[in-house]
Amino acid sequence: MRQPNVIIILADDLGYGDIGCDGGAHIRTPNLDRMAAEGVRFTDFYASANVCTPSRAGLLTGRYAIRSGLAHEVIQPADTTGLPLSEVTIPQALKPDYATALIGKWHLGHVAPHWPPTAYGFDAFYGLPYSHDMRPLSLYEGTGADVSAQEGRVDLSRLTQRFFEQTEAFAEANRDRPFFVLLALSAPHIPLVPNPDDPMGSPAGVYGEVVEEIDLNVGRLLTRLKALGIDDDTLVIFTSDNGPWFEGSAGPFRDRKGGSAWDGGFRVPFIARQPGRIPAGHVASGLSSNLDLLPTVLSLAGLPAPPGVELDGRDVSAMLTGEAASPNEEILLFNIIRVAALRTARWKLVARSYYRTYDVPLDALPLLFDMQADPGETYSVASLHPDVLTDMRARLSRARAKYEPIADQFPPHVAPASAADHPD
């Protein structure tokens, strides 16, 4: 079997409950639902952070963002920080076997040496330096070191359409060799600007319009892959960078994007489809996160893990095919540079949350939840399971001792001296 093409579709701020196959009732997502029916759906898949920048760093490197100095907050237009060039990304690890592209939003540094994204193993880039609610905003395009602004006034209403069209064009141009595309959408992050070319009439208002347009384009992409004769050769993954923000549904889970330790900010959709390789209609309930994408993609490509790199993610390729359970014994949930919660297959210990403007440590409460009986994290059962609490506290202490001191290695963000240091 040839090395698979890989397309990762990464929505921005899409909630677990926003698509039908995960229980959503307000937004119509027939193509994503069909994709799940023809492939695998993970029920307990986590973003590696509850906001954008650190989650994307985790996805691309297979390592918690605290290791790369990007756990603190979302990169802002005045920041000069970015993903260290010493980090090994998915496209770098796939070289030289794969043609690679980033299409969509980068948000891992927009000042040299963290710019352009082609410095990190992507052959081509078409997209935005950061979120489309940030200014100045331009659309960039190029290959190698030759990446430049193509539009100084970005048509936000057609970004989703254009990102999918660029992905289809890249797939067609590289149909005779393995390729990797990270299709990092800007939607449904605010501002919400529906495409007038694709009026959906969503019952969920403007947010629903934007999500249903994503779904429509997923269907178009799958149709195009089939027309190109590479449907069976292409692994398509759909997920989100974190939970929903001001609109959207976190499903049965508590809180939202940025919400400290609660699942609503971290638990996101995950669907994977490759006919002939992934059995249809499979649902996997084991623990997984976007940290697992790097080792899993490399495994499916028959390539080794990056040498000398300590990964936090695990190879979950056997979960995709239903051949094995999750290799993850636990998942850590970071809020900024603190380990705020720890999840195992059944249990979750919450150690930090917000009250008004306070980031409150909760070790003394304690908050232990049975995620099988109470996925909404409403009632602590610590008093009923003292042995479990002892074990979870020990796990949390080990995680804190391992990761939290790493934050001291990275200096605070430093704003550039002038606007000339921006990419625009």
Image (spheres, grey):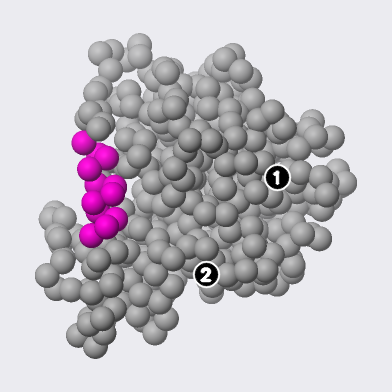
Residue 149 lies, in percent from the top left, at: 53, 18
Q: Residue furthest front?
A: 308
Residue toward you, 52 or 322: 322
Q: Quadrant of residue 409?
A: top left
- Residue kind at label 1, given as amino acid type: Gly
Residue 230 lies, in percent from the top left, at: 83, 46
Magenta part of the protein: which range? 397-408
| Nearest-to-viewer mark from 1 and 2 | 1
Whether 190 is drawn above or below 30: the answer is: above
Residue 138 lies, in percent from the top left, at: 49, 24
Q: Residue at x 24, y 76 (%)?
A: 389
- Residue kind at label 2, given as amino acid type: Gly
Q: Residue at x 47, y 38 (%)?
A: 309
Examine the structure image and report whether residue 407 is included in the region drawn in magenta.
Answer: yes
- Disc 1 marks which residue? 302
- Whether residue 130 appears in this view of the structure is no
Whether 283 is drawn above or below 93: the answer is: below
Residue 88 lies, in percent from the top left, at: 50, 33
Characterize the magenta stretch by its predominant secondary structure: helix
The number of numbered badges drawn on the structure is: 2
Left or right: where 327 falls relative to 82: right
Q: Secondary structure at mark 1?
A: loop
Graded by Cα atoms within 10 Å as few (under 14), some (14 to 19) or many (20 or more), the crowding at tag 1 reads: few
Q: Which mark is residue 286?
A: 2
Q: Quadrant of residue 145?
A: top right
Marks 1 and 2, the one that precedes in the sequence: 2
